[in-house]
Image: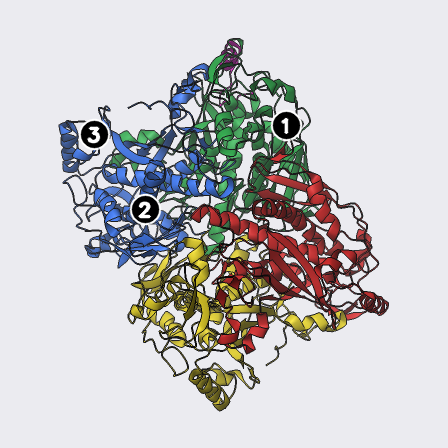
Chain colours: A blue, B green, C red, D yellow
Amino acid sequence: MSGNTLGTIFTVTNFGESHGPAIGCVIDGCPPGMELSEADIQSELDRRRPGTSRHVTQRNEPDAVEILSGVYQGVTTGTPIALLIRNTDQRSKDYSNISESFRPGHADYAYWHKYGVRDPRGGGRSSARLTAPTVAAGAVAKKWLKEQFGTEFRACMTQLGELPIAFESWEHVPHNPFFAPQADVQALEDYMDALRKAGDSCGAKLRVQATGMPVGLGEPLYDKLDAEIAYVMMGLNAVKGVEIGAGFASVAQRGTEHGDSLSPEGFRSNNAGGVLGGISTGQDLEVAIAIKPTSSIISPRESIDIHGQSTEVITKGRHDPCVGIRAAPIAEALLALVVMDHALRHRAQCGDVSLPLNPIPAAAP
Amino acid sequence: MSGNTLGTIFTVTNFGESHGPAIGCVIDGCPPGMELSEADIQSELDRRRPGTSRHVTQRNEPDAVEILSGVYQGVTTGTPIALLIRNTDQRSKDYSNISESFRPGHADYAYWHKYGVRDPRGGGRSSARLTAPTVAAGAVAKKWLKEQFGTEFRACMTQLGELPIAFESWEHVPHNPFFAPQADVQALEDYMDALRKAGDSCGAKLRVQATGMPVGLGEPLYDKLDAEIAYVMMGLNAVKGVEIGAGFASVAQRGTEHGDSLSPEGFRSNNAGGVLGGISTGQDLEVAIAIKPTSSIISPRESIDIHGQSTEVITKGRHDPCVGIRAAPIAEALLALVVMDHALRHRAQCGDVSLPLNPIPAAAP
Amino acid sequence: MSGNTLGTIFTVTNFGESHGPAIGCVIDGCPPGMELSEADIQSELDRRRPGTSRHVTQRNEPDAVEILSGVYQGVTTGTPIALLIRNTDQRSKDYSNISESFRPGHADYAYWHKYGVRDPRGGGRSSARLTAPTVAAGAVAKKWLKEQFGTEFRACMTQLGELPIAFESWEHVPHNPFFAPQADVQALEDYMDALRKAGDSCGAKLRVQATGMPVGLGEPLYDKLDAEIAYVMMGLNAVKGVEIGAGFASVAQRGTEHGDSLSPEGFRSNNAGGVLGGISTGQDLEVAIAIKPTSSIISPRESIDIHGQSTEVITKGRHDPCVGIRAAPIAEALLALVVMDHALRHRAQCGDVSLPLNPIPAAAP
Amino acid sequence: MSGNTLGTIFTVTNFGESHGPAIGCVIDGCPPGMELSEADIQSELDRRRPGTSRHVTQRNEPDAVEILSGVYQGVTTGTPIALLIRNTDQRSKDYSNISESFRPGHADYAYWHKYGVRDPRGGGRSSARLTAPTVAAGAVAKKWLKEQFGTEFRACMTQLGELPIAFESWEHVPHNPFFAPQADVQALEDYMDALRKAGDSCGAKLRVQATGMPVGLGEPLYDKLDAEIAYVMMGLNAVKGVEIGAGFASVAQRGTEHGDSLSPEGFRSNNAGGVLGGISTGQDLEVAIAIKPTSSIISPRESIDIHGQSTEVITKGRHDPCVGIRAAPIAEALLALVVMDHALRHRAQCGDVSLPLNPIPAAAP
């Protein structure tokens, strides 16, 4: 109810603060009988880990995960899976100068007014560090969905600041620090170097995809699959926009163009992004998200303090100049968690989940 | 769990099909002691009612609402408020030709594969007609929020197909059938007339706003206010994209530009759209949504039937050539329902809800 | 959240007041594809209907149910099933004398202090009349469980006031107005006649049973099957005690006696009442409930009014002198709703539901 | 959904197994601004800790709690409070002989059939050890309720096996290992010594009470305060019966006797147990629970193994011969958690919580 649990049947309850002793989550509702080890989870955490290139925060966190429960002799038991990640590289004194003022564009202001108390160290609860437990839980969902249905998740960056990134191939994504679908990312490197030198931050746009989707997932009227995708994506730190399929471009389309026609060989296009009437069609899920520039920057900004007085804010500490760079594995995890929950919800009401009954043509590359 | 209930404390459970005997909803969790009559709800229903101009479906539904419970001597009692709207103008035989085939871009295909059974009459449960109970429930939320905090909700169309609609003033919105913020809507009339003649449909873009917002609404980590706004908006029939504040434009902004600076007089801009860290700041909520073109069109489309065989589909029946035209009151209701629920959730954990503590400058017009 | 919804996957949202225009419920999460008609539901409603013998309230309500949604061509579609029952025989003026005073032992006092407003007509929302929608929803659950697993539900009275009712056979239960498992109920008739003459009311004890139970239903840690059974039973109007299996008698048992031993032919006893560790074993569910005497009696009682002043209360109107008499079908419905919800919850996490794998010996008669 | 979360607004998500690395819970929804330290929680954990007398299990667990999140500078922040308790004294090899057979009366059988996999070490997830996180969470609820309303919780044993325990005074309860309200507990000591010598186990009956209750807590129709009390109590390991107020004795009462009459000085009795119509009246909550004898005993029992073959089971390991002995602090915690959740639910819908408006006379001693 207080918003720290994601999902309805496969639930993830997230806890922790950026500079507290630990962060983690409790997964409830995982089907029993699946092989699961810390290595299955660690590999996903390593993809979002800080400190892996000069373009992200230099905070050095191993993000080593410990499974506290729910797994016996290497197999899930159906009971809650608690995951623990100790914080190890806090530098809390960096935040003493902002403990009584508000960073423009930061959650500081809102937390203070909501709770009347706030942990300013590293953003406390509002830190993007809290996406690590989400990624860990997502790894469990990904594993189950791949084993059950062959469903897989991937994400890439399609725009960095004002720089569009043309899609070349998914193959390039793991081979550069930007999760860019391009072989040559020198332009992105240069862009980020200039940005860092300017003491500023920038936004990014990402594409998120699920392939091998079962048909029939999603609950009308309100808990539509696309509604829940929008919910998790907009809930990701710094996201300001979400599109499914054709997204905002669909406004200028005609019905004769937008509606994906069907043939015995499958759909002929995917403007729907894999969802019709809130229910998956078996086509690839296609999602795009807009990520705003980080608010924690070293350039001085006009602001006020907790007494309402004028002040100037400079954020020290170690921050990502573009939080979108590390967002790909997080967005994949969120999409996987939504699909996982809806797979179980579907099974509850309708029994076995269907794999695509009709051949579904490949989505755009 | 099966997705027909919206909200957590102020909940709306929606029922009905387009051509069944009735549609309606049960509101649970409404605070006791508020004056409420059918007239309070009917006025909002009348704003989304079909048949009010030549640009919308000609189905003639009075959408007369009956309060079945929860109100005693004109005052809410704190017990569930059941609202009933009888369907009166069904023409179910219009649908006999599509009962065994799938309309491209329509929920037909997904419902069939999910449930193994489907009510084809008027789209059954997937019909936009089911937004009427949402609007009715939204009327209750709007009334309470206005009385408690002075919070108000409004929406207007900002693009019709490829036609952008420049914002002139909110005053024009009630005076034309498009909810357009323009004095002269002749271009929109002509556009729609041509479209209808072509047997096609088009999309639309809407702006949705809440003014007089309390500070502190929204629950981190997952149930952020903006996350829940994205959820309800993407869940609205035909919506393919949602933006909060600067939305997709924030990708190309710098941190020095995007982060709304603060002064003792209030925020200097509203790129955030009224939400920071998932919690309301007291600034206006600013939301934009993209609505796709209707799939129910009379132009013939390539499709398949339930046996997977090729067929051609022409949708008869009475349909909106642009569902975006009647979407404004629905989008307002959805935003009101989210704010209402979060106002009560906030009160549960943190006690009294705060009105803005700092002066908040007016948002862009 | 405001407590008018029962269940998590198979949910029942109940609305209405005793003397409002209608009562009813919305069932969400019913599996698609089950044949369902109003007759299936009406037969259960008729079992709890008032006015069927001289020992119950003489209010004359046909309790005719209308299915408003969720059924198409006689088959459930997987969308919400709304059920409507119009109130037809209200006599609201009977309550004018108690609208400002509190009946001892009645919800009056608590509602007034909770909501600050109260509908005194027939007890308003607190009336046992609101069990009718529960019975209607239970009829749907019963039908599905019987078709899927052969699970059946029955209840009988085992004590009326201080009069114990020896168990003879389930066969007698439908043939007397008390749901008593006895062939000769003259003693019960006489008891009730004397009670009514005295202007007083009495309590009752009921036994509730499910046979043909699947194995494995129930969710540890908190949502155990027996915990949820206790929840629904204690939530039934006037219930003050709930037992599972050996119940309070288990306090004086030894471990060597209580623990039901197992043999290849099945369990040798059923002290557990069909639940171990919160999970069904496949044995019969055995539940007992204690129902207090009705608070609405014509004998004068000492009380206070809403101003805290002394007053004397006499309840006119038409009331059941023993609400336990009509409680059997309600208790069956509640047990069915719990089992139904847990069958779907089990299917969500663990897949197919198991029928008993080991032979389970018959429970005590 | 999978049953490991208690509550709706103040939620407790419990994780862990008896012999896993750790147990714990995540509390979500705690109001911000309350002082909270590990000592506040440890004192309650120490009351239920094993190994404190010769009448309980000799497993030596310090049950030291660590607060991982949600508290900053000694004050709750409104974000999730994660509590961790490491297991330190597991002797898992004691269980090798029962890993393939079922203890009569134990959750073994049900877990195996539900999940198809089971952790036999110390009962795994079904162990009463998992009440420790519940007690820890209850300590937080108790502290808040005492500070806000002066509400307090206490429990005592009223029967040990067939031995009734006459109520003398609450003052004796902390001074004997049985939580008995008697000065002289020699009879209880002797009873337990004989039982242990016989290699058997026994049941117990407890009384649980809340004093200083606010008026108006509890949500009709289904989530009544007494319904939720029954749910948590029946969900406690080994509980087979729950009574509120007069409980099963109310069956033989008349309406003129049972209904607690009111005077300007308050209620004249408390047959209701502090709840009318599912809502608190401000009188003391009075609850009784029946606890069955432990199934883990060293006396040989007839049973079957996982292949359905006959076997004889002797449970080694260290077990409580009467789990009721340590149940008092657990039952208090459960009652506190229900009241806490309903206090916040009430505040959500109805605003400020009321303290008793009328003077409420003392309950029975």
**Distance from the alpha carbon under mark 2 to that under mark 1:** 42 Å
Q: Is residue B191 magenta?
A: yes
Q: Are marks 3 and 1 on the same chain?
A: no
Tell me whether the residue at label 3 lies in contact with that at label 2, contact meaning CB atoms closer than 8 angstroms.
Answer: no
**Of the pair D287 and B115, the residue shown nearer to us:** B115
The disc placed on residue B19 is 1
| Residue kind at label 3, given as amino acid type | Glu
Q: Position of residue B191 (x, y in %)?
A: 49, 12
The disc placed on residue A140 is 2
| Residue kind at label 2, given as amino acid type | Val
Q: Position of residue A20 (x, y in %)?
A: 27, 58
Which subunit holds the residue at mark 1? B
Above or below for A267 versus D354 = above
**Of the pair A215 and D333, the residue shown nearer to us:** A215
Residue indicated by mark 3: A171
| Magenta span of residues | B177-195
Asked whether residue A14 appears in the rendered view, the answer is yes
**Distance from the alpha carbon under mark 3 to that under mark 1:** 49 Å
Which subunit holds the residue at mark 2? A
Q: Nearer the viewer, mark 3 or mark 1?
A: 3
Sequence-earlier tag: 3 or 2: 2
In the picture, measured across the screen, residue C291 lies left or right of residue A28, that is right
Tell me whether the residue at label 2 lies in contact with that at label 1, contact meaning CB atoms closer than 8 angstroms.
Answer: no
Q: Are marks 3 and 2 on the same chain?
A: yes
**Distance from the alpha carbon under mark 3 to that under mark 2:** 23 Å
In the picture, measured across the screen, residue A350 lies left or right of residue A339, that is right
Name which residue lies at 58% across and 70% down: C247
Which subunit holds the residue at mark 3? A
| Residue kind at label 1, given as amino acid type | His
> What kind of element bears circle 2?
helix
Q: Quadrant of residue A164?
A: top left
